[in-house]
């Protein structure tokens, strides 16, 4: 997808720099030419030798090279800016953001930022402690860079080097490599999903008991959001129908917020006919209270009984009405007999693919960043995926969907 593209990778001094040799390898594998501009701080976390080895190019640090070297380009800080199609800075520390916003030019990374030709893209991945990221100074510098036309990718949530857990992590190299393909407008991406309409449901639903209480589940929405982002990376038009979650909308994705199962059903039904792929990743409540009380239901008796009624089965209805060329994809989160129950769901709902989701509350299932999936297609063929981050699991699942689309052509 990046064949022939010329990429400068700027690496500054954060712990996430250890991921960058893998990023360079992925970009090279995708057909790109990569040259690395390494800050002094970055060289403390990743070696020049490893970066030069995977890129096949010298690593650039100082604006003023050593004299007396035959063939040395003494204006390389200018020529690199002319050469590149895009500048990617990952990780970008608080110090680097400040230097970029101030227009400083004291090493090759900042020089490339200033000499990059007009109209070329700049993609910046801040990575630091969460409190640093949220500070007024860092947010001011980010706002200035956005105003200059830079694309700033908000860091992910997760475990940080400080031992805390929160916002500040740099995305995995696979995620960054895919995002570069989106930012470069003329990059080659031959995904069968390109131009297709993909609908993804995500998150939990809340079924009201009264004005202050509801029935719900532990779904975080992370898997559905990862699928929406991955589909967009492949050139699809993506509609994300989500229950109540606190996640950032993937860039370029249409987001529809709902609260309960009936609202999600109404939004999904409205666009059933227009989608090529319907992925039901939401944890939709099977039942809702028959009566919703106004205000707050007072405690009166020792026991309280709620009469529950069935919610619409969104995926089953799509499976029943889908036309030729449309794919129905579901999830089955199970604690016992997972594959057997997933196979049953696949047949009963007329699905083309189902992901059996192992649930242990530690490494897979709700609220965590990783998953263990077994994919089962309409021919009952199984593909077991190992433990991986949900972002990567989403890509693997979409790879399988693309194969199903190819088989129908």
Image (cartoon, grey):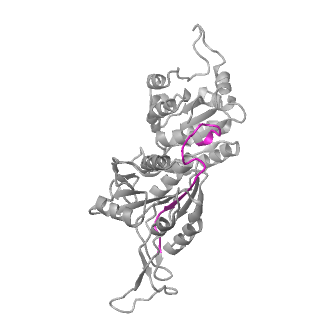
Please say whether residue 54 is one of the residues in the magenta stretch.
no
Does residue 101 appear to the left or right of 91 in the view shown? right
Q: Residue furthest right?
A: 118
Q: Residue furthest left?
A: 337
Quarter of the image holding residue 285?
Answer: bottom left
Q: State the predominant SS element of the stretch in magenta.
A: loop
**Residue 107 in sight here:** no
- Residue visible at 56% across and 32% down in the picture: 10
Quarter of the image holding residue 299?
Answer: bottom left
Residue placed most toward the observer, 324 or 192: 324
Please say whether residue 194 is one of the residues in the magenta stretch.
yes
Residue placed most toward the observer, 221 or 395: 395
**Residue 100 in sight here:** yes
Residue stretch in magenta: 182-206
Does residue 38 appear to the left or right of 73 in the view shown? left
Q: Position of residue 208 (x, y in %)?
A: 48, 79
Identify the image quadrant of the N terminus: top right
- Decide: is 107 above or below 265: above
- Decide: is 185 above or below 276: above
Q: Position of residue 255 (x, y in %)?
A: 58, 60
Residue placed most toward the observer, 143 or 364: 364
Count of picture labels: 0
- Decide: is 117 above or below 286: above
Does residue 309 appear to the left or right of 136 in the view shown? left
- Residue visible at 39% across and 48% down in the picture: 163
Q: Position of residue 99 (x, y in %)?
A: 62, 36
Q: Position of residue 181 (x, y in %)?
A: 58, 39
Residue placed most toward the observer, 49 or 43: 49
């Amino acid at each position: 997808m990046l064949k022939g593209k010329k990429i400068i990778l700027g690496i500054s001094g954060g712990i996430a720099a250890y991921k960058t040799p893998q990023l360079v390898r992925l970009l090279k594998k995708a057909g790109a030419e990569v040259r690395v501009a390494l800050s002094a701080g970055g060289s403390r976390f990743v070696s020049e030798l490893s970066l030069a080895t995977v890129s096949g190019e010298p690593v650039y640090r100082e604006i003023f090279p050593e004299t007396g070297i035959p063939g040395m380009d003494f204006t390389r800080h200018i020529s690199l800016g002319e050469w590149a199609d895009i500048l990617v800075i990952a990780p970008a520390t608080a110090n680097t953001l400040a230097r970029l916003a101030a227009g400083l030019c004291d090493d090759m990374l900042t020089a490339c930022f200033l000499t990059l030709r007009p109209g070329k893209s700049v993609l910046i991945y801040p990575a630091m402690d969460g409190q640093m990221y949220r500070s007024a100074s860092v947010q001011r510098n980010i706002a200035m860079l956005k105003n200059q036309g830079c694309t700033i990718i908000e860091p992910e949530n997760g475990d940080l080097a400080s031992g805390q857990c929160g916002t500040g992590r740099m995305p995995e190299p696979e995620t960054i490599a895919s995002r570069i393909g989106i930012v470069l407008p003329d990059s080659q991406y031959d995904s069968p999903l390109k131009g297709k309409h993909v609908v993804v449901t995500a998150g939990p639903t809340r079924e009201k008991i009264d004005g202050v209480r509801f029935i719900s589940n532990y779904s975080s929405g992370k898997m559905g959001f990862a699928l929406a982002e991955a589909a967009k990376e492949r050139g699809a038009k993506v509609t994300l129908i989500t229950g109540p979650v606190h996640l950032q909308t993937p860039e370029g994705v249409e987001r529809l917020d709902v609260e309960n199962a009936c609202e999600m059903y109404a939004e999904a039904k409205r666009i059933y006919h227009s989608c090529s792929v319907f992925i039901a990743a939401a944890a939709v409540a099977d039942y809702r209270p028959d009566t919703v009380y106004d205000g707050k239901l007072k405690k009166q008796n020792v026991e309280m009984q709620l009469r529950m009624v069935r919610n619409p089965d969104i995926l089953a209805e799509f499976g029943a009405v889908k036309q030729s060329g449309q794919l129905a994809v579901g999830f089955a989160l199970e604690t016992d007999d997972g594959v057997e129950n997933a196979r049953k769901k696949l047949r009963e709902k007329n699905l083309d693919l189902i992901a059996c989701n192992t649930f242990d509350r530690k490494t897979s299932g709700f609220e965590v960043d990783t998953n263990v999936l077994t994919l089962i297609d309409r021919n009952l063929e199984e593909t077991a995926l190992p433990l991986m981050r949900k972002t990567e699991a989403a890509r693997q699942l979409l790879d399988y969907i693309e194969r199903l689309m190819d088989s129908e052509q």
